[in-house]
Image (tube, rainbow, N blue to C red):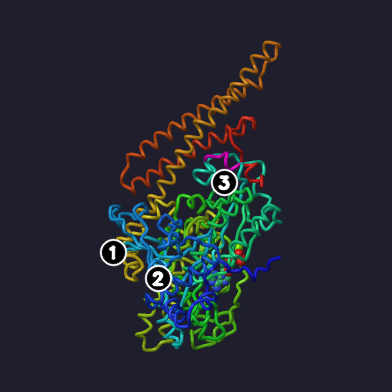
């Protein structure tokens, strides 16, 4: 048996390989670029490119590609081979520093939201040396950022890197105030837990909805769903176990630290979690993980569904974005400290995050808004669409004591003064967990739980980093000017808790009472993508995002348009698929069943005096349902036609929310009713019971 340690990272041009294949001088120069962002000399780029090519060709690679993350949320790649003609008619393998550093994909067909008129299709990709190159399917992949020639970000990586830089800058100012001057950089880390469904490929092939939209648009619930809670952490079926083992192996080869795997709540639902990594690398790895998950599934006769809501009636899939901030010296700034001073620093970062989440609820909400995710948020299976923070009882009590200026835990006699008095030693791993909170503190990190399973994690982290950077900046501005640091610190934390405690909620987020309560507290409830997305252009958000250099104003407006376009196009494809399935598959199948039953009646009646009560009742019911489906389909067709005439994107998104989606629900409900009374042998595609329990 091959040992994991032998093949782990074998397809990655990582530090080990760099050290082994580059000269000392080149290696050190590259490391400076990776660690400190110093510009890369072309001679160094040439040397790195040569070494990369040698290594890749040795491993059988014939092509290279600049791999990037356009605003579709997917990844893009264009492959070039290494070959170059030699004078003697043969070929040599070539790869220059210039080709490594910069690429010029024909960018005209990627969404840019008006940032780059399509006739000037000159976008370029720039190597991101902080994320290792790797080999996949005989191609050397070079992680890159994607910009327009005027410098606008056309992807999700550039703003992500900018947001990491913003938080680095502001956090360093704060650390300095606490006397921490030796820290050189601060980075955010993310561990994204990824949920997914596996279905049998032969069944998948028979469903147009799964093929076209990634989710079932029709389907009545089978007798059994997830109510027995027997799937969660249950024993893994052999076929799934084989898939998971194969998947782990492929991910490990790519240097992705796949760590945890288990069954999830819904039947056929599973989860994979890697060990956390620096945010931009975690983002690259998560994109790659999603791709490999789907590819490996095919080898096992399976299809991996990453849609947020593949099946109505059972849980959908999300992605938990475990997020923390740490220094280059390995200190996790979200870890409660051992000493009073460390605790004061921790509490300041905690206060900053509380304020950031409260001030920018809308940005966090819209960072996860997609047509698919709208089915989860607020559907009693995922966090509600309202943002709140879970801190656990202990931390909440600590904050409460600070706010009220009373001793915490009843031990200390005097008032609690941060950084001066001995602070309570609160336990590091808060044992109380809350699975219903959108943003939960879990001991030394926050878990942002609203992301959809197919979301790129970049958007959520861009907005989270930006919001926290903004508040850290406000705090640093204040504290740097303070005459008495400890007093100013104490007052600042106290005031922050007072002003923003409305965002803290430790109860059950799935409870309707919470939504009512949240409204009273003045928290935002942005139920759909159409409601959420326009807020990115609110003055306060534009000001904040531009002031930290995360986005330009043009980039913000372009993103709103792209995300809304994505929303309306997704739903429109779903609606059109529904009409197609209803007209060509479902209605004919039910009509055939009704007709066959009706002719059975005449046959029966010709040989006996039977009343045929059952058949008559059934045919009547089927006929009514056929009419109901036909009416609903016609309504949906009308909506689709009307939608085509709406040019303005905000109007289109509102139409989708208010007219198209309700019309789809109506058709689905009629068809699902018909399914429950139609003979299985007539039903035109595999039903839920087979899909959910058929692997
Ligand atoms: P659970 O399901 O209990 O939340 P998992 O083990 O499935 O836990 O996932 C936890 C995720 O959090 C993992 O990806 C893990 O690497 C990540 N994680 C742990 N510590 C940190 C940290 N300090 N910063 C960011 N992510 C972290
Ligand atoms: Mg988990």
- Residue plotted at (70% across, 11% down): 609
Q: Which residue is mark 1?
A: 150
Quarter of the render that holds ligand 1: bottom right
Residue sitting at x 56%, y 36%: 672
Tell which circle, 2 or 3, labels the residue nearer the N-terminal end.
2
For disc 3, the marked residue is 311
Work out how far the residue at label 2 is from the one at label 3, CA to CA, in angstroms: 48 Å
The answer to which of marks 3 and 1 sits earlier in the sequence is 1
| Most foreground residue, 657 or 459 | 459
Any mark on residue 195, and which? Answer: none
In the rendered view, would you say 416 is above or below 86? below
Q: Which is more foreground, mark 3 or mark 1?
A: 1
Q: Is residue 131 above or below residue 425?
A: above
Q: Which residue is mark 2?
A: 97
Q: Earlier in the sequence, mark 1 or mark 2?
A: 2
Of 179 and 157, which appears nearest the observer?
157
Q: Quadrant of the N terminus?
A: bottom right
């Amino acid at each position: 048996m091959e040992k994991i340690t032998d093949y782990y990272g074998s397809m990655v041009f990582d530090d080990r390989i760099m050290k082994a294949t580059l000269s000392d001088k080149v290696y050190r120069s590259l490391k400076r670029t990776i660690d400190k962002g110093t510009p890369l000399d072309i001679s160094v780029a040439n040397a790195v490119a040569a070494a990369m090519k040698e290594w890749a060709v040795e491993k059988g690679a014939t092509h290279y590609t600049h791999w990037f993350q356009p605003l579709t949320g997917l990844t893009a790649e264009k492959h070039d081979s290494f070959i170059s003609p030699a004078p003697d008619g043969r070929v040599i393998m070539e790869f220059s520093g210039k080709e490594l550093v910069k690429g010029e994909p024909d960018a005209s067909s990627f969404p840019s939201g008006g940032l780059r008129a399509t006739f000037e299709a000159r976008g370029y990709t720039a190597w991101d040396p902080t994320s290792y190159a790797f080999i996949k399917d005989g191609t050397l992949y070079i992680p890159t950022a994607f910009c327009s020639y005027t410098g606008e970000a056309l992807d999700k990586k550039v703003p992500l890197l900018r947001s990491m830089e913003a938080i680095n800058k502001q956090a360093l100012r704060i650390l300095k105030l606490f006397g921490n001057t030796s820290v050189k950089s601060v980075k955010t880390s993310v561990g994204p837990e990824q949920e997914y469904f596996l279905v049998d490929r032969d069944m998948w092939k028979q469903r147009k909805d799964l093929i076209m939209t990634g989710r079932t648009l029709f389907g009545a619930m089978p007798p059994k769903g997830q109510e027995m809670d027997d799937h969660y952490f249950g024993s893994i079926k052999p076929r799934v176990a084989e898939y998971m083992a194969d998947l782990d192996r492929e991910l490990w080869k790519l240097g992705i630290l796949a760590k945890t795997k288990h069954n999830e709540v819904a039947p056929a639902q599973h989860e994979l979690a890697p060990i956390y990594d620096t945010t931009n690398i975690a983002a690259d790895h998560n994109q790659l993980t999603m791709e490999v998950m789907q590819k490996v599934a095919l080898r096992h006769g399976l299809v991996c569904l990453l849609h947020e809501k593949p099946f109505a009636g059972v849980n959908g899939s999300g992605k938990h974005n475990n997020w923390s901030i740490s220094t280059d010296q390995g200190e996790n700034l979200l870890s409660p400290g051992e000493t009073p001073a460390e605790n004061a620093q921790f509490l300041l970062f905690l206060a900053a995050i509380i304020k950031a989440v409260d001030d920018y609820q809308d940005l966090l909400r819209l960072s996860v808004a997609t047509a698919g995710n709208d089915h989860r948020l607020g559907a009693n299976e995922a966090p509600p669409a309202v943002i709140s923070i879970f801190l656990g009882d202990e931390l909440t009590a600590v904050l409460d004591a600070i706010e009220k200026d009373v001793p915490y835990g009843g031990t200390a006699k005097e008032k609690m003064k941060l950084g001066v008095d001995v602070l309570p030693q609160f336990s590091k791993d808060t044992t109380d967990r809350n699975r219903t909170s959108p943003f939960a503190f879990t001991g030394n990190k926050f878990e942002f739980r609203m992301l959809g399973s197919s979301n790129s994690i970049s958007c959520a982290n861009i907005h989270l980093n930006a919001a926290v950077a903004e508040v850290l900046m406000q705090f640093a501005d204040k504290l740097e000017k303070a005459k008495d640091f400890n007093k100013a610190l104490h007052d600042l934390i106290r005031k922050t808790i007072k002003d923003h405690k409305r965002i803290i909620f430790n109860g059950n987020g799935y409870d309707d009472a919470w939504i009512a309560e949240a409204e009273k507290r003045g928290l935002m409830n942005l139920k759909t993508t159409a409601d959420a997305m326009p807020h990115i252009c609110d003055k306060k958000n534009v000001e904040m995002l531009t002031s930290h250099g995360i986005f330009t104003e043009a980039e913000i407006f372009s993103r709103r348009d792209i995300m809304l376009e994505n929303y309306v196009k997704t739903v429109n494809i779903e609606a059109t698929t529904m009409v197609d399935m209803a007209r060509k598959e479902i209605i004919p199948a039910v009509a055939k069943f009704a007709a066959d039953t009706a002719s059975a009646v005449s046959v029966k009646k010709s040989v006996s005096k039977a009343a045929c009560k059952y058949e008559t009742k059934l045919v009547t019911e089927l006929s009514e349902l056929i009419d109901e489906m036909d009416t609903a389909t016609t309504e949906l067709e009308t909506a689709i036609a009307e939608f085509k005439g709406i040019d303005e994107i905000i109007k289109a998104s509102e139409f989708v929310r208010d007219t198209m989606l309700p019309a789809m629900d109506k058709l689905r409900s009629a068809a699902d009713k018909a399914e429950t009374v139609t003979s299985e042998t007539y039903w035109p595609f595999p039903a839920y019971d087979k899909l959910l329990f058929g692997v």
